[in-house]
Image (cartoon, rainbow, N blue to C red):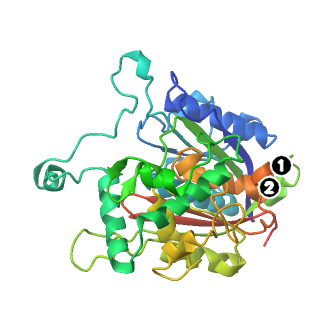
Amino acid sequence: MSAVIAGLGITEMGKVYGRTAAEFAADAVRLAAADAGLAVPDIDGMLTNTGISGDVGLGLQRDLGLRDLRLLSEIQAYGSSAGAMVQYAAMAVGSGMADVVACVFADAPLKDPSSGAGAAYAGAGSRPTGWRGLAAASGIYSANTMYALAARRHMRTYGTTSEQFGHIAVAQRAWAARNPLAQMRDPITLADHQNSRWIAEPFHLLDCCLVSNGGVAVIVTSADRAADLPQPAVHILGWGQAHPGYVMGPGSELGLVSGAAISGPTALKMAGVTIADIDVAELYDCYTFTALLSLEDYGFCAKGEGGPFAASGALGPEGRLAVNTGGGQLSSYYMWGMTPLSEAVIQARGQGGERQAPRHDLVLVSGNGGLLDHHSTLVLSPNPR
């Protein structure tokens, strides 16, 4: 029994204050069910994932008034979780374990700066202590600083430049300008990128993803059931995961290779296609560097050639490869792996409007979590296998 994505729900997104992640999650599931032409009680399976705020879990079942679920679990592989949830949902539907599975992510880390809370961003937990605190004591304690180290290694190894990172940011903003859902739609230039303030060298502000409040959900069901539903079915042709387990020590490939090098070929083989067949790539882009590394590891360009490939103009709306067509996490919204997944569903359905890729028979979706520790890949299509 083949599985498809039959519903997509996206809440209001961005600087939306006064609502919890759990409230966003419940709304996203309701929207996804309605989009699929289903009632919420039709859902008999649910997989949840939460971001920084951490308040979306098994209790979402009660929030939605769901009874007698046949599948319920929290999935945590950080930014690769969305792809993993769809994989598990597809397996559940294929085995008959569940008929209609909702996969949902929501987060609400942004706080209203006028509320007196003191900061617009709540942060992400406490810093490590003991021996694990040595890196933090030297200033390496956040995703920004750790990814900056990984990016710097790539730059020193392959000659990748900050300007080449900037071409990715400019291309994705050009896509976002065509996306009414995007938070940042004003065009930017390479000079804007280079002049934006430093966050952690080599990353400028425009190398880094947004922070967003909101929720996204998808409904996974069988192709047979989806045939009677209102939305075009998005067929889940292939999937893969990879968890490299890099360490920051001698012999590590951190910064040089990501899990996409393993999960990509796995998903493509399952789908029965090659990377040359892919029409649209929705890549996890917490940083411009992450997207560049994924382009190399999936095989869209040779290892070490991600910088020149980006600088060639290949990635923008007029380029030869449709990448992050909604603007990605850099310019659209940051919902962990649900950002590339939601745009992939829109593209596969042919509902992208001004940003619709003319060829969208095969859409690749990547998710990345931790410090390049986890990776998921999906191959989606409007057509069955």
What mark, if any, has residue 231 been given in the picture?
1
Which residue does the image show at 24% across and 68% down from the upper left?
248
Circle 1 residues within 10 Å: few <14, some 14–19, many ≥20:
some
For marks 2 and 1 on the same chain, the one whose residue lies earlier in the sequence:
1
> Mark 1 is on which residue type?
Gln
Residue 22 locus on image (x, y percent): 52, 31
Determine whether the residue tagged by mark 1 lies in a helix, strand or loop: loop
Q: Quadrant of the N terminus?
A: bottom right
Q: In this orientation, does residue 66 appear?
A: no
Residue 160 locus on image (x, y percent): 42, 73
Determine whether the residue tagged by mark 2 lies in a helix, strand or loop: helix
Residue 66 locus on image (x, y percent): 63, 33
Farthest residue to the left: give it: 130
Circle 2 residues within 10 Å: few <14, some 14–19, many ≥20:
some
Task: Give the tally of numbered discs.
Answer: 2
Which residue does the image show at 87% across and 55% down from the upper left?
227
What mark, if any, has residue 349 been given in the picture?
2
Distance CA(mark 2)–CA(mark 1): 8 Å
What mark, if any, has residue 41 been given in the picture?
none
Which residue does the image show at 78% across and 44% down from the upper left?
36
Please say if the residues under marks 2 and 1 sit with CB atoms less than 8 Å apart.
yes
- Indicate the quadrant where residue 55 lies: top left
Q: Is residue 265 left or right of residue 344?
A: left
Nearest the eye: 248 or 195: 195
Residue 188 locus on image (x, y percent): 57, 50
